[in-house]
Image (cartoon, rainbow, N blue to C red):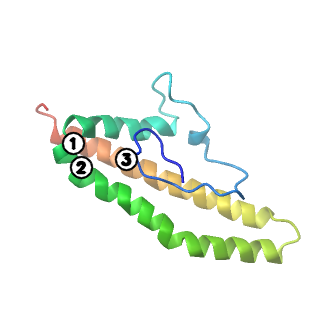
Amino acid sequence: WVCLDNPGQSPRYPIFCGNTQLPQVLKICGNHRYREDSALWHFRQANKLATVRWGTCRTIMEPARDYFLQKGLRELPFVEDTYTRLAAKANDEKEATDFLNGYVSDYVGGAILKWDELYRTYWRLFWSGF
């Protein structure tokens, strides 16, 4: 399980030893400057706003963070079974690794979308000041 920015605020997402590719947004470093093409900043913007008014924001952010962890745990048996079945039926593991690569890409994309939504929600909450 991997988490970007603040582990107390950010969602975790799985990366499997069978992955051969990661989403492009995970290949871009966002540590030295703001970059919209880096996954880090999609999490960091919402996390920074939430930190300013943590008492208010945690009631929104913690359930979102926990949702992604529970989602991963709930789906893990399906992912493992599907990968095993695909790997067993194919002479090569391309179909199985494509499945894992797609699953991780979709998972990360969903988390980024949710954190972008949280970022916009927090700005609407605090438009008149913190």
Please state if 19 lies on the left or on the right of 47 as rendered.
right
Q: Which mark is residue 54?
A: 1
Q: Position of residue 28 (x, y in %)?
A: 58, 33
Q: Which mark is residue 5?
A: none
Q: Position of residue 45 (x, y in %)?
A: 35, 35
Q: Which mark is residue 115?
A: 3
Q: Amino acid at mark 1?
A: Trp
Please state if 12 lies on the left or on the right of 78 as rendered.
left
Residue assigned mark 2: 58
Residue at the (73%, 77%) spot, across then down: 85
Q: Position of residue 113 (x, y in %)?
A: 42, 50
Q: Are marks 1 and 2 in contact (CB under 8 Å)?
A: yes
Neighbours of disc 1 within 10 Å: few (<14), some (14-19), many (20+): some
Q: Earlier in the sequence, mark 3 or mark 1?
A: 1
Q: Position of residue 57 (x, y in %)?
A: 22, 46
Q: Residue furthest left?
A: 128
Q: Secondary structure at mark 2?
A: helix
Distance between the alpha carbons at the discs numbered 1 and 2: 5 Å
Q: Amino acid at mark 3?
A: Trp
Q: Nearer the viewer, mark 3 or mark 2?
A: 2
Residue at the (46%, 55%) spot, across then down: 110
Q: Residue furthest right?
A: 91
Residue at the (30%, 54%) spot, across then down: 62
Q: Quadrant of residue 123?
A: top left
Distance between the alpha carbons at the discs numbered 3 and 1: 15 Å
Q: Secondary structure at mark 3?
A: helix
Q: Quadrant of residue 100?
A: bottom right
